[in-house]
Amino acid sequence: MNGVILAALIVGGTGLILGLFLGLADKKFKVEVDEKEALIRAELPGNNCGGCGYAGCDAVAKAIAEGEADVDVCPVGGAEAAAKIASIMGKEAKPGVRMTAFVRCAGTCGKTRSNYEYYGVRDCAVMEFVPSGGPKSCIYGCLGYGNCVKACKFDAIHVMDGIAVVDKEKCKACGACVAQCPKHLIELVPYEMDHLVQCVSKDKGKAVMQACRAGCIGCRKCEKECPTGAVSVTDNIANIDYGGCANCGVCAQVCPRKIITGVPEKR
């Protein structure tokens, strides 16, 4: 019986000593957390998507608190989060422009053709090791294997009829899909833009028409008819200056290939 009591005393004493040691260690090595940093972190969405350019929400909260990042650096939180964070930092939030991802390819299964049947790994990044960069006749077009879909944490992009399509209402403009596209077809564009060129092919007109029924042929009709001079054709492909575009739609009306379009809201 005495042995049991002695063992209990030893265990209890050891626990008490360890508890005191851990309590003292906690005070000595405690990491002070900036109150602003904690408040900022509470206003961030917590997706840890990396769209801000930092490792995650904790990292960007620290950067904002230390003045190393702007209050509106989080694309997912948007204007609402920026306003709250600006208030915490004692700053005024700048009016931001909402962005969304856009896939510059209209080469669906019915508009382009395949040079051969491919039965290998269905991964866009692997295509650089495959003949002609993939089975599609257009070497610039969407491969349709969905690396961008896998990268999106917001279910905002899906492969439909052979090409990736963005749902602008779900898109948070984090840029994850942009980084994953080996063809560099996806870009961030202003949410309000209604007219975008859905092609990046740099081939001349004849070659484009042989490869795809939806490709830009560089005819320059959009460039000539644009009333604000926002459209220019470089390397056989039309490009729109979003800052100068009036969203009038003239370019879309005169395009013979009908590849000037907007980002779909839902598909």
Image (cartoon, rainbow, N blue to C red):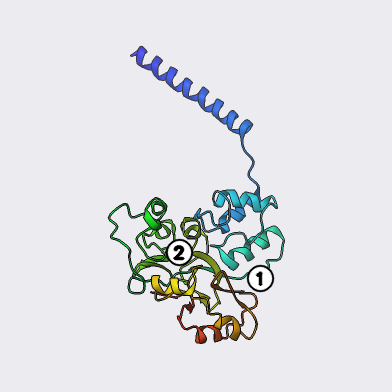
Task: Answer few, some or many: residues within 10 Å of disc 2's Cα (few below 14, many 20 plus, some between 14 and 19).
Answer: many
Residue 84: x and y in percent read 62, 63
- The residue labelled by disc 2 is 140
- Left or right for 115, reference 141: left
Please name the residue shown 35% across and 16% down the image: 4
Question: On screen, 267 above or below 249?
Answer: above
Would you say 135 lies left or right of 45 here?
left
* Quarter of the figure with the C terminus: bottom left
Q: Give above or below for 177 relative to 205.
A: above
- The reply to whether callout 2 and callout 1 are in contact (CB within 8 Å) is no
Vertical side of 196 occupied by 3: above or below: above
N-terminal of the pair, mark 2 or mark 1, is: 1
Q: Position of residue 120 (x, y in %)?
A: 30, 52
Type of residue at label 1?
Answer: Pro
Residue 124 disc label? none
Q: Is 55 located above or below residue 245 in the figure?
A: above
Q: Looking at the image, which is closer to me, 165 or 222?
A: 222
Query: Looking at the picture, how far across and down is residue 191, in whole percent?
Result: 54, 73
Under circle 2, the secondary element is loop
Closer to the camera in the image, 232 or 93: 232
Which quarter of the picture shows residue 228?
bottom right
Residue lying at the far front of the rendered structure? 206
**Would you call the spot at circle 1 few (<14 residues within 10 Å), some (14-19), or many (20 or more)?**
few
Q: Nearer the viewer, mark 2 or mark 1?
A: 2
**Measured from the top left, where is residue 251 in percent x and y?**
54, 83
- Which structural element holds mark 1? loop
Tag on residue 95? 1
CA separation in Å, label 2 and label 1? 36 Å
- Under mark 2, the amino acid is Tyr
